[in-house]
Amino acid sequence: MSVEAFEIKKPFLRSLLEQAREGQIQLPEFQRGWVWPENNIRSLLGSVSRGFPVGTLMMLQAGGHTRFKQRPIEGVDLVGDVLATQLLLDGQQRITSLYQALMLGRPVATIDERRREVQGWFYVDINLALDDDADQDEAFRFVPADRTIRTSFGRTELDLSTMEGECQASLFPMSQVFDADDWGYQFTKLHNYAPEAIEVWQSFNKRFIKRFEQYLVPVIELPATTPREAVCQVFEKVNTGGVTLTVFELLTATYAADEFNLREHWDQCRMQWSDGKFRVLSAVSETDFLQAVTLLATYRRRETAGTADAKGGPRIGCRRVDMLRLPLDDFKKSSEEIVNGLLMAAKFLHHRNIFDVKFVPYGAQLIPLAAICAALGQAWHRYDVQQKVARWYWCGVFGELYSGTTETRFARDLPDVVDWALGRTSAEPRTVAEAQFAPGRLRTLRTRNSAAYKGVYALLLAGGARDWCSGNPINAATYFDDAIDIHHVFPQAWCAKQSLDRGIYDSVINKTPLSAYTNRHILGGSAPSSYLAKLTAMGAVDAPALRSHVATHLINPDVLLHDDFDTFIAQREAVLLDLIATAMDSGFTHADESNQVPTEELIAEGESHTVEFKASAFLDLRTNQAEAERRYIIVRTVCGFLNADGGSLFIGVEDDGNPVGLEGDMRSINVPDLDKYELRLREMIENHLSTTTAATVRVEFPAVSGKKICQVIVAPAIRPVFLKRTKALGGKGEVEFCVRRGNATVLLQGDHMERYKEEHWGHHALPRMEPEGQVGDTTDIDHLVSSPEFEMRVDGLLATAQIIDGDFTVRAGSQVRPRWTAGEHSYRGLRIHLEKAGVITVSSDGRTAVFTRDYQFKAPSAAAAMVVGRPTNGRTDWRLRGTATTFAEWERGAKGTD
């Protein structure tokens, strides 16, 4: 919003309060109720009495397209329906406090220092108010509602219930500050019109009362044409003292202006899945519901525009701004569809043996799933359609693709999956194409915190697992009655006695779904051979049936009868991987084979292209302090392995191969166990790389020479990975591209980086991104599938690009001008969007900026503008790499035209 879009006025405080009393100034419904402590009000009155500023108010002119349900300032009683001329966005607490204290005419409702609700009146001590050396805040007193101050024993200490009592005590009621003449007359009369009394009153009137009457309040007034999302954003920016409003609350106020009760509607909707059979939906929030409705509504809008398969139509999305822009009519149309979509999604999960909300892999994935179900309509009931949707679902789960910011993925999923499922396109959804699962990940899945962990559990149930004792299939009919949960096969206590690797025996490989009854006879800590014998001896089940039931869990009963833990792990790991591979129908990433070599042998061979030693990840052993440089070295090494051929990073091992363990490192970051250490390590890696590492990095804790060390096993990435060196890593936001060269990690830039990327990956693994908000030249490149590389060299910057699937794609690592240098332009909005989305990252010192990942534009001019920081003719700025041939000249040749 430009500066010219609003006005700054300075009305009198009295005028503002009178406008509030008449209902000309009201609050938008999304403003929460007012409660300000008595001490805060006292301080506010003190500031006004001394002429100090109390901050700027912000208001919105009412009557425009942006309509909110209105309500009066707290304490104002309006007769009939009064429409406001202004809505107060910022300053509610100040205006409400001043209105109640100065103009309400009845006790002020507030809270005391103990947070107790109290009511009373504000008075000012005239003598203290006139004392220049006194603390003016202390001049104000808060008196109970009956205007009587009593001792702890109930004896009246001061009675201000009459004007005479007030005058005798020289305590002026603030409720009379705008109508003080009568009180002043009574004050001087009580003192027999003594010259001293008249002088006190005249001085008080001039130095105190006149300040309230003449006090000016700066007000920023937004025009009625201000868009709704801008109003909401402004409100949240200025409302720093309050709790952030949810989209649901904002839309509730918006829709209420059209007499639509969103909260009541939401309550009616969720009642439809309150039945126990839909408990997988019990965690669906009002915001989830709004996102799903918005996703479907924007998809329908694009369908109506006839651009469902084309670029350039209305965007599909469910970001905050999309929800705030959703018209009520669109909400109503899509809301009912999403209710049905959620119920269909619940049945879909039931058919895949997901019955309980605590075992739903990703609650967030329900949002696109519900929209997909609704969009497919009757086609949802087709077998081939559900099989494709199931594959998309499992790829999202085992690819662990819904753990971060997901709105962009949702917007891709809906059209991608619907078109693919209905056979409109043979192209797999991007979620399917991008999903990877590293086999070693199974050994690190230990708790329900992981979506893939819950996915394995569901696949076991869906595979026909039966209870070991009863032999009953574990399905919707028995799941809750038999209290099914996931339990260890080799009990923890037994494994600990055998000194087995806790990371392995606590993993999902050693767990299976069992009834509470069966589990009670296993938890004793005995060996599998013992508890199986116990189950048959007690008559719970005969031996042949027990073997059959155990086998339904993809477990060889013979290895249990022989207590062969290693064979059990090896066999079950293999069958679980097959189970996941079948569900995903692709997506396995095989880690570097060096992890198959015994740890001692790897360390003995020393550092190499695929092996690196670090004594610590967090602690500098020289200074005995955790430091950023140490963390940077760890993340840089992982990034180098990802961009090369993978490898193993050993932490707790000195450069000469001597194991020193992890005790000091763990103490430096105050973690009590290896699980917490792994969590911190993974967070550090994940937060500073341009891609998720759940499928490509696994963490193990082998013991060498009696010391626990950490082995970070890294699989090669399928596309370039960039490191962002933030302050936490001792940097200023620089984006780096790291690779392995020999036994060192090095940084590549410019032509060297581009050449490496081309040699290492080629151009087959580019992520496809939905272009947004791009306008400019009308270059027709949709017919082009791929092209040679183009480059821009300007002011020492180097950017490279290529046409991929008809889109002009700027490559990751391209350098750009760190700031926009032109005025207002549609490209400026796109540049801001790309920076907010992290596609373009500017270093903290503002000197450099790069593309962190490949990004697809509709036209070369949009791409060029992002590079040079101003509108420009990209058709002549981009040149065929290594030549003087412009894009326009190359395009004419590619089309066969002159």
Image (cartoon, grey):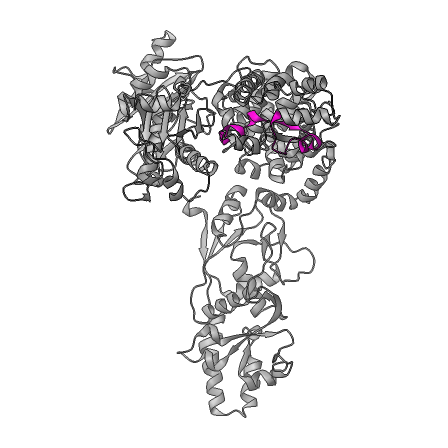
**Would you identify the image quadrant in which residue 389 lies?**
top right
Q: Residue 82: x and y, percent?
A: 65, 56
Q: Is residue 228 above or below residue 867?
A: below
**Would you identify the image quadrant in which residue 807 lies?**
top left
Q: Is residue 160 above or below residue 299?
A: below
Query: In which quadrant is the C terminus drawn?
Result: top left
Q: Is residue 58 above or below residue 105?
A: above
In the rendered image, residue 237 lying in the magenta stretch gets the answer no
Residue farthest along the top direction in this orientation: 896
Residue 306 visible, this angle: no
Task: Give the side of residue 552 with respect to residue 501, left or right.
Answer: right
Q: How many numbered callouts? A: 0
Residue 3 visible, this angle: yes
Of residues 494 and 301, the one nearer the viewer is 494
Residue farthest along the left direction in this orientation: 796
Q: Is residue 166 above or below residue 890?
A: below
Q: Residue at x 57, y 69 (%)?
A: 101
Q: Residue at x 39, y 24 (%)?
A: 599
Q: Residue at x 72, y 18 (%)?
A: 545
Q: Residue 91: x and y, percent?
A: 51, 57
Magenta-tinted stretch: 501-528
